[in-house]
Image: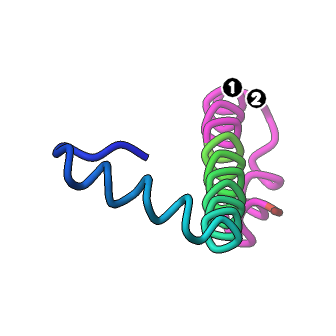
């Protein structure tokens, strides 16, 4: 984590040294949120690509079902 000011960065470094357990817990939570966000982003991109690929094909009844129920996560 970087700050714009040297004082801000010094405060962060001090906190990391003073409370490593808290820092590690917060870091794990941040990484988990990032994984979830990335997965959702990837699934939505694949979903849109699939919709684009299937526009001209004869699967309109399946498309209607997917549009009503949404992507399965």
Residue at x 33% of width, y 60% of height:
11
Residue at x 64% of width, y 45% of height:
38
| Residue 46 percent coordinates (x, y) | 70, 36
Query: Is residue 50 rendered magenta in the image?
Result: yes
Viewer-nearest residue: 34 or 42: 34
| Marks 1/2: CA–CA distance | 8 Å
| Residue 41 percent coordinates (x, y) | 60, 46
Q: Is residue 73 left or right of residue 19?
A: right
Contact (Cβ within 8 Å) of mark 1 with mark 2? yes
Residue at x 44% of width, y 53% of height:
13
Viewer-nearest residue: 2 or 50: 2
Q: Is residue 48 left or right of residue 50?
A: left
Q: Which mark is residue 57?
A: 2
Compared with 52, 62 (above or below) is: below
Label 2: which secondary element: loop
The label nearer to you, 1 versus 2, is 1
Compared with 6, 12 (above or below) is: below
Label 1: which secondary element: helix
Residue at x 63% of width, y 74% of height:
22
Q: Which residue is mark 1?
A: 53
| Residue 23 percent coordinates (x, y) | 61, 65
Quadrant including the C terminus: bottom right
The count of marks equals 2
Q: Which residues are magenta?
A: 45-71
Q: Is residue 2 left or right of residue 72?
A: left
In terms of image quadrants, where is residue 28? bottom right
The type of colouring in the image is rainbow
């Amino acid at each position: 984590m970087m700050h714009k000011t040297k004082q801000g960065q010094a405060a962060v470094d001090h906190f990391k040294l003073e409370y490593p357990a808290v820092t590690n817990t917060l870091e794990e939570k941040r990484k988990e949120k990032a994984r979830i966000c990335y997965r959702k982003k990837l699934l939505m991109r694949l979903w849109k690509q699939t919709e684009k690929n299937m526009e001209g094909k004869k699967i309109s009844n399946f498309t209607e079902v997917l549009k009503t129920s949404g992507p399965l996560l």
